[in-house]
Amino acid sequence: QAVVTQEPSLTVSPGGTVTLTCGSSTGDVTSGHSPYWFQQRPGQAPKTLIYDTSKKYSWTPGRFSGSLLGGKATLTLSGAQPEDEALYYCQISYSGARRVFGGGTKLTVL
Amino acid sequence: EVQLLESGGALVQPGGSLRLSCAASGFTFSNYAMSWVRQAPGKGLEWVSSISGGGDSTFYADSLGGRFSISRDNSKNTLHLRMTSLRAGDTALYYCTKSGSVSPRDGFHMWGQGTLVTVSS
């Protein structure tokens, strides 16, 4: 089974910018993998922030953006806020409806 | 407002069975594929199963070994997950999720709060 990799932890200063990455053991992540990004705060259900690489919802703060770079999916946070401290999961779609999540990145705003 | 309310989680012995339900409201249920995603205590997310809007197409994670069955009742706006031969490794919070289309290949756009399944003797 494919393995999706993320940084275990990252730290960003308030107001700063950070990029989280999401790689696949099968090769380059492309738009065909429809990467998703989820935010999970402690004790809460996940919330979907980004779908299909870069698409946002009405509830997605403008400071979050998704893209592809260097064969990976990326989530960039520009202008970090204290409330952005959370776990972030990416998810890649493979053949059929098989979806695999990354192990998550713990983002600290400090 | 979209609402997904899971129920049915419980403490069950190894080898037992359980049926989870998810009551959906705030959208035309039959127009959207639905999925179950689980999260073991202190662990990451794992896709479990997906079903098309009409219920005619289903998909399962390979790791389940055919022990789970997803279904839906569009007349009652309810999603189900029948789990059998439960193991300790199935202990998790099970989330009901809504996709963005009828296709089960679509992703997890909205989430319920989850229902806890604990498999232990």
Image: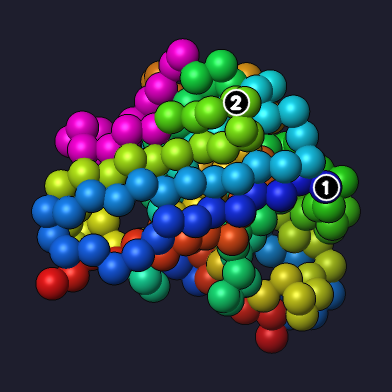
Say the numbered circle drawn on residue B97: none
**Which residue type does callout 1 highlight?**
Glu
**For residue B63, which quarter of the picture?**
top left
Residue B47's place in the image compared with B74, above or below, is below
Report, in whole angstroms, how far the alpha carbon at label 1 lies from the one at label 2.
18 Å
**Residue ID at (87%, 46%):** A58
**Residue ID at (41%, 22%):** B58
Residue at the extreme front of the image, as rendered: B75
Image coords of residue A81 (percent x, y): 80, 75
Viewed as shown, does residue B115 lie left or right of A58? Answer: left
**For residue B12, which quarter of the picture?**
bottom left
Say the numbered circle drawn on residue B1: 1
Q: How crowded is mark 2: few (under 14 residues within 10 Å), some or many (20 or more)?
A: some
The subunit letter for the residue under badge 2 reads: B
Q: Is A6 included in the stretch rendered in magenta?
A: no
Image coords of residue A5 (percent x, y): 41, 51
Residue numbers of the magenta segment: B56-70
Q: Is B68 included in the stretch rendered in magenta?
A: yes
The subunit letter for the residue under badge 1 reads: B
Viewed as shown, does residue A42 lie left or right of B57? Answer: right
Q: How crowded is mark 1: few (under 14 residues within 10 Å), some or many (20 or more)?
A: few
Report if residue A77 is visible in the image.
yes
State the SS at label 1: loop
State the SS at label 2: loop
Q: Nearer the viewer, residue A93 or B120?
A: B120
Image coords of residue A21 (percent x, y): 55, 51
Give the tally of numbered discs.
2
Q: Which of A66 and B13 is in front in this view?
A: B13
Q: Mark 2 points at which residue?
A: B74
**Which residue type does callout 2 highlight?**
Asn
Q: Which of A98 and A81 is in front in this view?
A: A98
